[in-house]
Image (cartoon, helix red, strand yellow):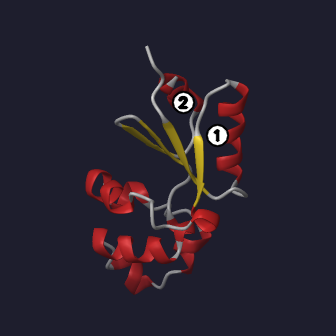
Amino acid sequence: MTRPSIVLYGIKNCDTVKKARKWLDKNDVDYRFHDFRDDGMGDVPLQAWLEAFGWQQVLNRRSTSWRALDDGQKNGMDDAAALALAAETPTLIKRPVTVAGDRTLFGFREADFSELV
């Protein structure tokens, strides 16, 4: 059985992304890392994530970036607003986002990653 092609999206200095990358490296898993800041947002399937999972799962509502939004932005959040805000401020996206074949994971849990390989 061929392993799915894995793309890990995130920001390289994010602690959770570091944990995920360390786990993948330790388990000898081939993956491509896409840094939201260094590689840009052009190739990020943000709209597809929002359509499939909704803004509540895609955005990290515990982040400093979320807390920096005004109450009007938070209370009026929907997928369209999330698309615009996350494209402009990628630190709003829950990290890492791991895409392996037809599976997409938000955040890092070792048990979930173990199922990918």
Q: Residue at x 56, y 35 (%)?
A: 109
Q: Report x, y in % for residue 40.
A: 55, 67
Q: Quadrant of the N terminus?
A: top left
Q: Closer to the camera, 18 or 43?
A: 43
Q: Earlier in the sequence, mark 1 or mark 2?
A: 1
Say if 24 sits above or below 41 in the image. Answer: above
The 10 Å Cα crowd at callout 2, few under 14, some 14 to 19, many 20 or more, is: some
Residue ID for mark 2:
113
Say if 73 sits above or below 33 in the image. Answer: below
Residue ID for mark 1:
20
Q: Amino acid at mark 1?
A: Ala
Mark 1–mark 2 Cα distance, whole angstroms, equals 8 Å
Tell me if label 1 and label 2 are in contact, CB under 8 Å: yes
The 10 Å Cα crowd at callout 1, few under 14, some 14 to 19, many 20 or more, is: many
Q: Secondary structure at mark 1?
A: helix
Q: Secondary structure at mark 2?
A: helix
Q: Residue at x 45, y 29 (%)?
A: 4
Q: Closer to the camera, 113 or 37?
A: 37
